[in-house]
Image: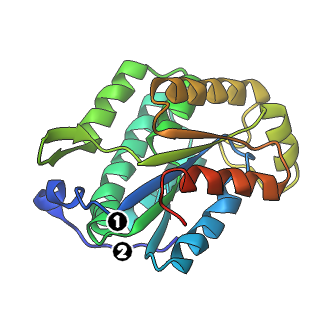
């Protein structure tokens, strides 16, 4: 993923209030097909003259990518996993997302905090109140009207039955620590996404991922156009 390592340090809070910067996250269980549509949406924005930054979580910066490797491949308990994910997110926000939004770019991110609540929270069974505290600690920024927790302007949730997702993943590649989990783990993860969707419905667009590829893309396009971001 392309990255721009411009540290905003203590001036981070002033960079998020750009009125034309857009932050869109892509969410869903492994195998839902979300990654397929990120590049296509980037092309749609670029065709209308927008600068686009593509990224992912965990990851997006040199430090966060190192932490991603640990999270995906090293054995650890749920708390360690959550702390590493949020540490990676903090660096990602400072070094990549904040500068991109300050330049009025469109940031398209493969996963963000909703994934932490779904995977570490619902999937691993880690305490949700602790995750909420970490979310507030890591993502609180300052704006003209006071502090707020930075969230994507839009979250595209690619919803797919875990059994279907497992069939898609079968024999595609060597699975990491998450992809190798049993179906009941992903059933809990999907329930975690549903909970976040119900808590913040104005931010989410629920995409039926069990459709032909072109139909899924049309759903993505419609969700973005409804917000007036694409002609």
Element type where label 1 sits in the image: helix
99 to 147, vertically: above or below: below
Q: Residue 179: x percent and y percent?
A: 71, 43
The crowd level at tag 2 (other Cα within 10 Å; few <14, some 14-19, many 20+) is: some
Gap between marks 2 and 1 measured at Cα = 5 Å
Q: How many marks do you count on the picture? A: 2
Provide the residue designation for mark 1: 96
Task: Depth check: give the residue in front, 192 or 45.
Answer: 45
Q: Are marks 2 and 1 in contact (CB under 8 Å)?
A: yes
Residue 99 visible (yes or no): yes
Residue at left offset 36%, top offset 74%: 4
9 vs 153, left or right, is left
Q: Residue 207: x percent and y percent?
A: 68, 42
Question: Can you tell which mark lies on residue 188?
Answer: none
Comes first in the chain, label 2 or label 1:
2
Provide the residue designation for mark 2: 4
Q: Residue 14: x percent and y percent?
A: 15, 58
The crowd level at tag 1 (other Cα within 10 Å; few <14, some 14-19, many 20+) is: many
Q: Residue 67: x percent and y percent?
A: 44, 54
Residue at left offset 40%, top offset 44%: 84
167 vs 66, left or right, is right
For residue 20, which quarter of the picture? bottom left
Q: What colouring style does the render use?
A: rainbow
For residue 41, which quarter of the picture? bottom right
Residue 173 visible (yes or no): no
Task: Depth check: give the residue in front, 85 or 41.
Answer: 41
Residue at left offset 46%, top offset 35%: 202
66 to 113, vertically: above or below: below
Residue at left offset 37%, top offset 50%: 89
Element type where label 2 sits in the image: loop
Q: Quadrant of the C terminus?
A: bottom right
């Amino acid at each position: 993923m392309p990255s721009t390592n411009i540290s905003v340090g203590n001036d981070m809070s002033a960079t998020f209030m750009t009125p034309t910067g857009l932050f869109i996250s892509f969410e869903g269980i492994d195998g839902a097909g979300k990654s397929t549509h990120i590049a296509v949406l980037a092309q749609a924005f670029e065709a209308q003259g927008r600068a686009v930054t593509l990224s992912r979580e965990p990851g997006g910066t040199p430090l966060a990518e190192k932490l991603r490797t640990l999270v995906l491949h090293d054995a650890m308990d749920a708390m360690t996993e959550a702390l590493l994910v949020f540490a990676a997110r903090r660096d990602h926000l400072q070094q990549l997302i904040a500068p991109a939004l300050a330049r009025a770019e469109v940031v398209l991110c493969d996963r963000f905090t909703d994934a932490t609540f779904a995977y570490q929270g619902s999937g691993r069974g880690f305490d949700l109140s602790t995750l909420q505290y970490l979310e507030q600690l890591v993502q609180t920024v300052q704006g003209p009207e006071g502090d707020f927790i930075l969230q994507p302007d839009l979250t595209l949730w690619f919803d797919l039955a875990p059994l279907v997702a497992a069939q898609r993943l079968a024999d595609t590649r060597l699975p990491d620590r998450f992809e190798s989990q049993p179906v009941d783990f992903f059933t809990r993860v999907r329930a975690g996404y549903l909970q976040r969707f119900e808590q913040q419905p104005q931010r989410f667009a629920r995409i039926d991922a069990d459709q032909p590829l072109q139909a899924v893309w049309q759903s993505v396009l419609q969700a973005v156009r409804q917000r007036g971001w694409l002609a």
